[in-house]
Image: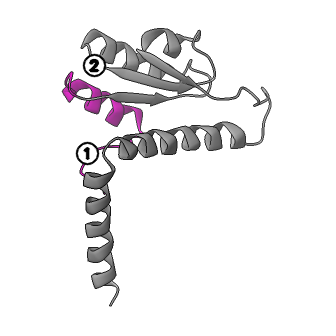
Amino acid sequence: MRIGKSSSDCPDIHLQMSFVSVMTQEDLAIFVSYCGETKGIVTAAKWAKEMNIPSVAITQSAYNKLGKLVDYVLTIPSQEQPLRIGAISSRYSSLIVVDLLYYGLVKRNKEEYAQKIINTRRIIQEMEK
């Protein structure tokens, strides 16, 4: 939002379906699933594909169900074990990829986005006075 781009994070699958249903070909759907087999995310990706919405998956393999449905796959290391206490490395890997996507977008038009970030910082600093 700080650079003037609308984005939404929908951890709830019902909200994901709602968002996909109103997306257009001008949008980009980004699906994050370590295993790439999560039924809800795969279903949302199928709908995006049927609606010709450009899509990206952040997942461990381009050959899982999710990877086969999207336009682009950004793979993360597959180091998680089948029996695990928490998905630490896959979560961090996914977050790093999302951050890199943001940095890449900002880098494409640094002057415009830099001014928007500065303006946001000024507003926040004024509130903190």
Crowding at mark 1 (Cα within 10 Å: few <14, some 14-19, many 20+): few
Dot 2, how many residues are within 10 Å of its Cα: few (below 14), some (14-19), or many (20+)?
Answer: many
Q: Residue at x 26, y 46 (%)?
A: 5
Q: Position of residue 94 (x, y in %)?
A: 57, 37
- Contact between marks 2 and 1 (CB within 8 A): the answer is no
Quick check: 39 left or right of 77?
left
Residue 84 on the magenta segment: no
Query: Along the polypeptide, which appears first: circle 2 or circle 1?
Result: 1
Q: Is residue 5 magenta?
A: yes
Query: Which amino acid type is marked by label 2?
Result: Ile
Label of residue 53 in the image:
2
Quadrant of res 127: bottom left
Above or below — where is 116 with respect to 96?
A: below
Which image quarter: residue 86? top right
Which residue corresponds to the image point at 32% horizontal and 58% vertical from the top-left? Answer: 114
How many numbered marks appear? Answer: 2
Look at 35% across and 41% down and name the residue there. Answer: 108
Where, by quadrant of the figure, is residue 92 drawn?
A: top right
The residue that disc 1 covers is 6
Magenta part mainly helix, strand or loop? loop
Amino acid bearing label 1:
Ser
Above or below, 47 relative to 76: above
As drawn, the residue found furthest toward the front would be 111
Tell me if I can see residue 3 in this picture.
Answer: no
In the figure, is residue 65 to the left or right of 1?
A: right
Q: Which residues are magenta?
A: 1-26
Q: In the image, residue 66 lies at what x, y percent?
A: 50, 16
Badge number at residue 120: none
Give me the residue at 28% from left, 83% from top: 126
Instruction: Give above or below for 81 relative to 104.
Output: above
